[in-house]
Image (cartoon, rainbow, N blue to C red):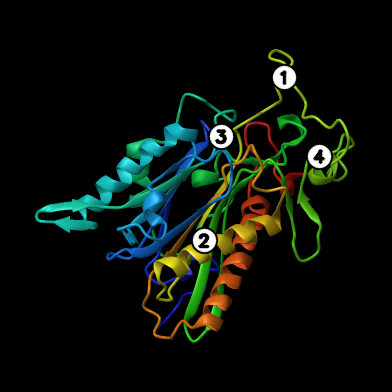
């Protein structure tokens, strides 16, 4: 089996990624298309404010095993409508579960809350989901302020005034003999982005003098800490369900549904390595996992551990790239512009 070296989730054979990007309104969506026969799917939801579609059927014990696409989108709960366009695209191409002359694609989806950046009235819908599918390729994935990462922001513990631009990133790990694990992440966290290898804060709330970042986790542990309030509403800035990091990990190994759900779980571990704090009460952190098959090696306990470890590392790297590759938008600067 031949694999590419895009350093992205598209290094997993059969995976295609496409974006729809609206820089004027700071909104967008990203689709991960599986091989025509679908991929064994799993999911792990750890945030307490998720916005999702078709997640229950991915858990062990449910009848449906394969998923045909995963949509990552902005627009909060409104953005889930974009999945309808992905379904239309797949139906037109005859991809999905067949029941006589009926084709039913399985499209799982998760959203980020980005309505406070750009226009809150413009959200991805069916046409935008369809356009993302038309743009899908197996080549390198465009990163940063693109697709579902267009309206993403991070490091919001001190409010948007000190936030940093988030974005979309991807990474892959080649484990030898054609075995590949890849990840794609949309980074819209309330927490800081940290390099897990060094502990260095890559993106945190900006200090007043413009030199360095505050440590959100350490601040939150201080007695009496509270996020700044909007002057007009006396409510914490971007309070509640206004954050979330979402993503997909994928491999070309042949995994069972139980194993692919374990892979999704380890993807969340990668998120916790790079986002601090993660899985907060204001996040809806969700990771999907896909196993496309096609790799001929056996997946024993040791091999599953390698794949799962790679999923965690690839997710952490994708999160870091989503922030470091971003460009500023709507007055929120990117780390490369500071």
Secondary structure at numbered mark 4 = helix
How many numbered marks have been drawn onto this rendered protein structure? 4
Q: CA distance from mark 1 to mark 3?
A: 17 Å
Q: Residues within 10 Å of mark 2 (few under 14, many from 20)?
A: many
Mark linked to residue 264:
2
Residue 230 disc label? 1
Instruction: Between residue 258 and residue 192, name the one nearer to us.
Output: 258
Mark in the foreground, 1 or 2: 2
Classed neighbour count for the residue bearing mark 1: other residues with Cα under 10 Å, few (<14), some (14–19), many (≥20): few
Which tag, 2 or 3, sits closer to the chain's start? 3
Residue 240 vertical position relative to residue 333 in the rendered view, above or below: above
Circles 2, 3 touching at the beta carbon (< 8 Å): no
On the rendered structure, is 135 left or right of 102?
right
Task: Name the image quarter holding the C terminus.
Answer: top right
Q: Please tell me whether mark 2 or mark 3 is closer to you in this view.
A: 2
Query: Are the residues at dot 1 and dot 2 in contact (C-beta closer than 8 Å)?
Result: no
- Alpha carbon distance from label 2 to label 3: 24 Å
Name the residue beneath numbered marker 4.
220
Q: Residue furthest left?
A: 100
**Are circles 1 and 3 on residues that touch, CB within 8 Å?**
no
Q: Nearer the viewer, mark 4 or mark 3?
A: 4
Distance Cα–Cα, label 1 vs label 4: 19 Å
Q: Earlier in the sequence, mark 1 or mark 2?
A: 1
Q: Which residue is mark 3?
A: 114
């Amino acid at each position: 089996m031949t694999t590419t070296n895009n350093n992205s989730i598209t290094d997993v054979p059969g995976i295609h990624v496409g974006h729809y990007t609206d820089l004027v309104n700071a909104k967008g969506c990203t689709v991960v298309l599986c091989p025509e026969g679908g991929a064994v799917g799993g999911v792990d939801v750890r945030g307490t404010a998720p916005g999702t579609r078709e997640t229950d059927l991915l858990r062990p014990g449910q009848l449906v095993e394969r998923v045909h696409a995963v949509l990552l989108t902005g627009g909060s709960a409104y953005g889930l409508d974009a999945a309808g366009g992905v379904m239309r695209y797949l139906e037109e191409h005859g991809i999905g579960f067949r029941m006589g002359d009926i084709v039913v694609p399985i499209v799982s989806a998760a959203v980020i809350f980005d309505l406070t950046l750009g226009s809150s009235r413009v959200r991805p819908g069916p046409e935008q989901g369809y356009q993302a599918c038309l743009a899908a390729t197996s080549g390198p994935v465009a990163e940063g302020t693109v697709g579902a990462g267009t309206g993403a922001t991070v490091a919001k513990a001190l409010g948007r005034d000190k936030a940093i631009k988030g974005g979309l990133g991807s990474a892959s790990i080649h484990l030898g003999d054609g075995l590949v694990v890849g990840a794609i992440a949309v980074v819209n966290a309330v927490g800081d982005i940290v390099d897990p290898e060094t502990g260095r804060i890559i993106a945190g709330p900006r200090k007043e003098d413009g030199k360095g970042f505050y440590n959100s986790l350490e601040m939150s542990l201080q007695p009496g800490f509270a996020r700044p309030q909007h002057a007009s509403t006396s409510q914490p800035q971007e309070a509640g369900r206004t954050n979330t990091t979402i993503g997909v990990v994928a491999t070309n190994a042949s995994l069972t549904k139980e194993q692919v759900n374990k892979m999704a779980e380890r993807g969340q571990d990668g998120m916790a390595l790079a986002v601090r704090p993660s899985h907060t009460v204001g996040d809806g952190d969700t990771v999907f996992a896909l196993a496309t098959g096609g790799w001929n090696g056996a997946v024993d306990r040791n091999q599953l551990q390698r794949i799962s470890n790679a999923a965690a590392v690839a997710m952490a790297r994708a999160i870091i790239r989503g922030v470091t590759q971003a460009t500023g938008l709507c007055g929120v600067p990117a780390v490369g512009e500071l």
